[in-house]
Amino acid sequence: MIYTVGCSFADPTIEAEWNDFYSLEKLPALISVSGFHTSQRFKALSAGCPVYLAIHSIDNLDVLQGDEYRQKGGGNFARCQQHITDWHRNLYAGLDRAPAIGEDEHLVTSAVGPEPLIEMSLTPYRMQAVALEKRPEVLWLAKLGRSFDLGQEQFPKSVHLYAPMTNQLTKGGISEEYGDE
């Protein structure tokens, strides 16, 4: 299953510190939770969505309801919690593992169906919301390759472009699909 967490951050004076905390402390803590398999963070390059997105591959909803998840920081952002805005959490079925997005690649999401992704010659992956907010009810993901000209593309409403902020973390370390190329 895919667990997504989207949010924005309201205090630009400590946003870099918060990003360091999230990427360097929180993600490694979460990937160590039993039932977590991958974790990766992204920053939006398009408007109309939360600025930050984390995508985790997990076993099931029980993982998010367990003591180990809460003890390792799941569900909160420590002292920065007061600055978190536009916070959304969803659990999706349809994919066992989130795609690893390389440093020269992008993630595209669509809440309006697969058509915009197909028109971009991308392979869309369908996910159905099964728990937490359940909005959007269906979300499509696609990996945007390096050769795509971002300056030419206009995205329809509810289609968003994200750049990776971190490697995709896995239980064994960093995903092979990202690596240092």
Image (cartoon, rainbow, N blue to C red):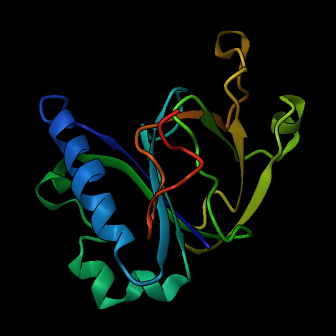
Confirm whether residue 75 shows in the render.
no
Please name the residue shown 44% across and 68% down the image: 172
With 120 as the anchor, is 27 left or right in this view?
A: left
Q: Nearer the viewer, residue 17 or 82?
A: 17
Tell me residue 109's x, y (percent). 66, 43
**Circle count:** 0
Please name the residue shown 56% across and 83% down the image: 60
Tell me residue 131's x, y (percent). 57, 76
Q: Nearer the viewer, residue 150 or 102?
A: 102
Please name the residue shown 52% across and 27% down the image: 47
Q: Residue furthest front?
A: 181
With 105 as the anchor, is 170 left or right in this view?
A: left
With 145 as the anchor, is 176 left or right in this view?
A: left
Indicate whether 85 appears above or below 77.
above
Please name the residue shown 41% across and 43% down the image: 166
Tell me residue 179's x, y (percent). 50, 43
Confirm whether residue 64 shows in the render.
yes
Q: Quadrant of the N terminus?
A: bottom right
Q: Nearer the viewer, residue 30 or 75?
A: 30
